[in-house]
Amino acid sequence: MSESQTGASVMAAIHERRSVRSYSPYVMDQSIVRSLLAAAVRAPTAKHEEPWIFAIVQDNGLLKRISDLAKKLMAESESQAHVDRGAHPPDFFSIEHFNIFYNAGTLVVICGKLLGEYVVADCWLAAENLMLAAFSMGLGTCVIGSAVSALNRPEIKSELNIPSDVRVIAPIIIGVPEGETGLTPRKEPHICSWN
């Protein structure tokens, strides 16, 4: 972890954080994961509900099984919808050796019991806190939206001890980046009104 990232300011973390898609084969220590979760739960939460529930996956065999299931579900979904996802070609998920977790050794699954109106927003706020905290520690992260369907399957939820009335919202991989991840351009803020 570089010294500049350790003391990264909030604005620097926001502007320099990247979605990392290449990781060294390193599994995060429990103390690091717990530190990131402590940052996640400091997120704003509507009505102070704190609806988040976390599942941590570090077992390589389980990560591979979830990746394989997610690829199968995404390939089926894309072939039915005939939609190009932009970042990945339509047949990307049928590539046998492709790992949707990019070989990261830790997956944090942020879930919520969907009772309140703002549960999903609260969980995404926790996700952003976790990702910025990870960046400040010199770690890489990436939201893996393509894993949501697989992670919400009853058999996977059961294996991860996720209660049946709880929904997976934000799966995030965490690890030590391998190589550099370039800056991705962003559009300027679209301001529709300033009264």
Image (spheres, rainbow, N blue to C red):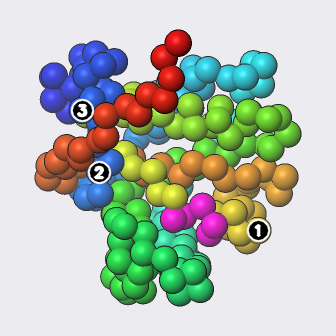
Residue 128 pos. (x, y %): 48, 33
* Magenta span: chief secondary structure: helix
What distance separates the C-alpha of mark 2 from that of mark 1?
Answer: 29 Å
Question: Disc 1 on helix, strand or loop?
Answer: helix
Query: Which is nearer the N-term, disc 2 or disc 1?
Result: 2
Residue with the most extreme top position? 195
Tell me if 36 is positioned left or right of 88 in this view: right
What distance separates the C-alpha of mark 3 from that of mark 1?
Answer: 37 Å
Where 118 sits versus 176, above or below? above
Kind of residue sitting beneath label 2: Val
Tell me if 106 is positioned left or right of 50 in this view: left
Residue 195 pos. (x, y %): 53, 12
Residue 148 pos. (x, y %): 60, 61
Frontmost residue, 38 versus 18 = 18
Q: Residues within 10 Å of mark 3 (few under 14, many from 20)?
A: some
Q: How many labels does the image show?
A: 3
Query: Is disc 3 in contact with disc 1, using a CB cutoff of under 8 Å?
Result: no
Residue labelled with disc 3:
16
Answer whether residue 34 is visible to the viewer in this image: no
Residue lying at 20% horizontally and 33% vertically, measured from the top left: 1
Residue lying at 84% horizontally and 52% vertically, measured from the top left: 165
Q: Can you tell which of label 2 and label 1 is closer to the viewer?
A: 2
Residue lying at 37% horizontally and 31% vertically, measured from the top left: 189
Kind of residue sitting beneath label 1: Pro
Residue 66 pos. (x, y %): 54, 70
Where 165 sits versus 124, above or below? below
Which segment did they paint magenta? 146-150
Frontmost residue, 172 versus 124 = 124
Residue labelled with disc 2:
20
What distance separates the C-alpha of mark 3 from that of mark 2?
Answer: 12 Å
Answer whether residue 156 is visible to the viewer in this image: yes
Residue labelled with disc 1:
154
